Structures are given as C-alpha cells and as structure tokens.
Image (cartoon, rainbow, N blue to C red):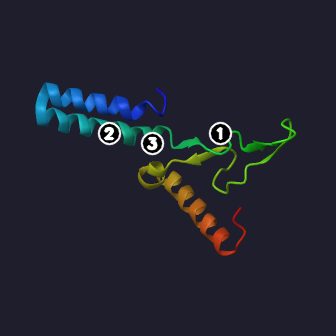
C-alpha cells in the first residue's frame, strides 16, 4: 500500500464499518486501526527522509553524478524515526528520538543548523 492511498483506504474501512454495523462497528474499526498503527510503530519505527529519499545523499544540480551528504541533522543516513515511534514505540527508539531532538535543538541554538 502506498503512503498517499492509506488515508483513502482507512476512510473506506471506517465508512464500510459504519454502514454495516453502525456505531459499534465504527468503534471496533477505529480500535482495530489504532492497534494496527501501534503494531506498525513497533515493527517499523523508521521511514525514509523526504529530502534525500532515503539515500543519505543529495545529488548535484549541475553535475548530477556527484553527491554530498544530506544536510538534514535528523536524517542519519537516509532514515529517520517516525513521530509515533518516537512517542509510543519501543524504549530504545524513544531514547534515540529524544537524543536526535536534543541534538537538533542544540544545533539551532549554536547557529550550526543547516
């Protein structure tokens, strides 16, 4: 399933459950989606960085065969921790998320951000 189609599929599931089972079905479907989301955070806590598309490098504009390291401080080689995993995920992922957030804040205060 692609990321852009996920909200539409979720909306379809919730609409179908409301049409078929009314309010009780909607609550059960919402609870099921929540459990699936938390399970997904546990199994897959990282996602691709948007700027470098998960490669950890940015290609040159003129000389396209050259590249440089991705400037995003939270990128860490092309992968970053999902927001939900940083708050609801496993303990070691939450710790890593907090350290990355602290480093980002310190870099902004020292004017070394980007």
| Vertical arrangement, residue 60 with respect to residue 9, above or below | below
Classify 10 Å Cα crowding around label 1: few (below 14), some (14-19), many (20 and above): some
Q: Which residue is mark 1?
A: 53
Residue at x-position 12% and y-position 32%: 22
Residue at x-position 67% and y-position 50%: 76
Q: Quadrant of residue 71?
A: bottom right
Mark nearer the viewer, 2 or 1: 1
Residue at x-position 49% and y-position 29%: 2
Q: Which residue is mark 2?
A: 35
Observer-nearest residue: 38 or 63? 63
Is disc 1 placed on a helix, strand or loop? loop
Is disc 3 placed on a helix, strand or loop? helix
Is disc 2 placed on a helix, strand or loop? helix
Residue 58 visible in the shown view: yes
Whole-angstrom CA distance, mark 2 to mark 1, is: 28 Å
Residue 54 as seen in the image, left or right of residue 30: right
Which tag, 2 or 1, sits closer to the chain's start? Answer: 2
Mark nearer the viewer, 1 or 3: 1
Which mark, by number, is residue 39?
Answer: none
Q: Are the residues flagged by discs 2 and 3 in contact, CB closer than 8 Å?
A: no
Whole-angstrom CA distance, mark 2 to mark 3, is: 11 Å
How many tags in the picture?
3
Q: Which residue is mark 3?
A: 42
Residue 10: percent from the left, percent from the top? 33, 32
Residue at x-position 48% and y-position 53%: 86
| Vertical arrangement, residue 65 with respect to residue 58, above or below | above
Q: Residue furthest front?
A: 62
Classify 10 Å Cα crowding around label 2: few (below 14), some (14-19), many (20 and above): few
């Amino acid at each position: 399933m692609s990321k852009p189609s996920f909200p539409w599929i979720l909306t379809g599931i919730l609409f179908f459950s409301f049409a078929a089972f009314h309010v009780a079905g909607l609550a059960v479907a919402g609870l099921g989606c929540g459990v699936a989301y938390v399970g997904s955070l546990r199994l897959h806590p990282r996602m691709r960085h948007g700027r470098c598309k998960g490669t950890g490098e940015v290609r040159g504009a003129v000389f396209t065969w050259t590249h440089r390291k991705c400037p995003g401080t939270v990128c860490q080689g092309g992968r970053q921790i999902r927001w939900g995993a940083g708050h609801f995920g496993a303990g070691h992922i939450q710790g890593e998320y907090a350290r990355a957030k602290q480093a980002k804040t310190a870099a902004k205060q020292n004017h070394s951000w980007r």
